Image (cartoon, rainbow, N blue to C red):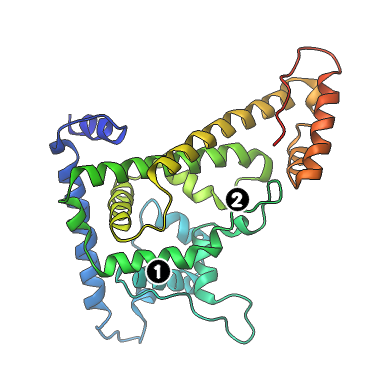
């Protein structure tokens, strides 16, 4: 019954607080205790001279998220990424390190981008636009660190229900966006499309503890900063992302089921057509010619 109540609350239904608040408080206490331990461990000596992040990287402990990150990073990069996360959680993050003399990108920044699987957000392009998650990563971490420095997640978990519910909706819609956009683009650009692979995987799996952390963290950020999109804007983005997913999958279906569109709706041709506006206009002309080639009619594609 507790699980059902929690799921109904997660889906936006009104249920008694006993079905969701105790679990949030439990998750908040776990996070807050972990941060306190991190602070105390940082001052402890290690016989090998290893830093805390190096000790964590060497540890065999893992979970559903860390297992995926560990698979992508060497021990050095993993330690650098953990170092960034530790400074964010303790409120000490002020920015990534400066690149060394022979580096184009700082070691800790490169490790974090690779850990979060964001690299292709710098290169994948749709109508001349890139998501470029990497350019805002430092700012987001700075805002998070500032929020963690001045409060605890338990403060949020025992706070007003409306603030928590609002954050829950923001998180749900953010996950909807990640999942829908990845579905819409992965068949065209590959599984790492636009740096959305990890976020879409989280949206699909929804690990309970991580979801709790996201809800409480978002509520804390809302309390400390107005730098983020409003809840209404996030909801609107989610609806548009799901419409884009439906449209994109319809195009893929036509490309595989209707011989007229096998070429114009191939992943390569769609990717080329979405490169920029001139490419898009030429592609739409090809689609129209294919549509007029006979067989069941295809609704006209709206131009941007």
Q: CA distance from mark 2 to mark 1?
A: 23 Å
Identify the image quadrant of the C terminus.
Answer: top right
The reply, left or right, for residue 258 in relation to residue 122 is right
Q: Which mark is residue 142?
A: 1
Label 1 neighbourhood size at 10 Å, few (<14), some (14-19), many (20+)? many
Find the residue positioned furthest to the top: 295
Residue 178 location in percent, x, y? 49, 44
Name the residue beneath numbered marker 2: 194
Q: Say what secondary structure mark 1 lies in.
A: helix
* Residue 188 visible to an observer of this rendering: yes
* Residue 206 visible to an observer of this rendering: no
Q: Nearer the viewer, residue 203 or 163?
A: 163
Label 2 neighbourhood size at 10 Å, few (<14), some (14-19), many (20+)? many
Q: Is residue 102 above or below residue 232?
A: below
The reply, left or right, for residue 14 in relation to residue 105 is left
Residue 91 location in percent, x, y? 31, 71
The structure residue drawn at horizontal position 67% and vertical position 25%, both measured from the top left corner, is: 253
Q: Which mark is residue 301?
A: none
The structure residue drawn at horizontal position 53% and vertical position 37%, both measured from the top left corner, is: 241
Q: Quadrant of residue 133?
A: bottom right
Residue 144 location in percent, x, y? 35, 64
Q: Is residue 13 above or below residue 190?
A: above
Q: Is residue 289 above or below residue 131?
A: above
Residue 1 location in percent, x, y? 17, 29
Number of the front mark, 2 or 1: 1
Q: Nearer the viewer, residue 121 or 259?
A: 121
Q: Say what secondary structure mark 2 lies in.
A: helix
The reply, left or right, for residue 130 in relation to residue 107 is right
Label located before the other in sequence (2 or 1): 1
Q: Quadrant of residue 23?
A: top left
The structure residue drawn at horizontal position 30% and vertical position 61%, both measured from the top left corner, is: 224
């Amino acid at each position: 019954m507790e699980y059902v109540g929690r799921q109904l609350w997660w889906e936006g239904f009104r249920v008694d607080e006993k079905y969701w608040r105790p679990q949030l408080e439990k998750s908040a206490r776990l996070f807050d205790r972990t941060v306190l331990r991190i602070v105390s461990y940082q001052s402890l000596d290690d016989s090998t001279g290893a830093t805390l992040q190096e000790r964590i990287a060497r540890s065999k402990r893992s979970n559903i998220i860390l297992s995926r990150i560990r698979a992508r990073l060497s021990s050095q990069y993993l330690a650098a990424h953990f170092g960034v996360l530790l400074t964010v959680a303790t409120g000490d993050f002020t920015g990534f390190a400066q690149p060394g003399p022979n580096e184009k990108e700082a070691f800790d920044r490169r490790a974090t981008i690779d850990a979060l699987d964001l690299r292709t957000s710098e290169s994948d392009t749709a109508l001349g636009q890139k998501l470029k998650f990497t350019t805002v990563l430092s700012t987001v971490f700075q805002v998070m660190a500032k929020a963690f420095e001045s409060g605890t997640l338990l403060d949020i978990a025992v706070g007003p229900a409306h603030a928590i519910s609002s954050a829950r909706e923001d998180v749900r819609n953010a996950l909807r966006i990640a999942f829908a956009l990845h579905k819409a683009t992965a068949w065209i650009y590959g599984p790492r499309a636009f740096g959305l692979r990890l976020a879409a995987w989280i949206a699909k799996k929804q690990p309970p503890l991580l979801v709790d952390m996201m809800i409480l963290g978002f509520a804390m950020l809302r309390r400390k900063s107005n730098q983020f999109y409003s809840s209404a804007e996030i909801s609107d983005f989610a609806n548009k992302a799901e419409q884009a997913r439906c449209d994109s999958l319809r195009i893929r279906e036509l490309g595989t089921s209707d011989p007229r569109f096998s070429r114009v709706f191939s992943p390569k041709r769609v990717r080329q057509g979405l490169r920029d506006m001139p490419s898009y206009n030429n592609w739409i002309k090809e689609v129209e010619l294919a549509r007029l080639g006979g067989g069941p009619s295809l609704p006209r594609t709206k131009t941007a």
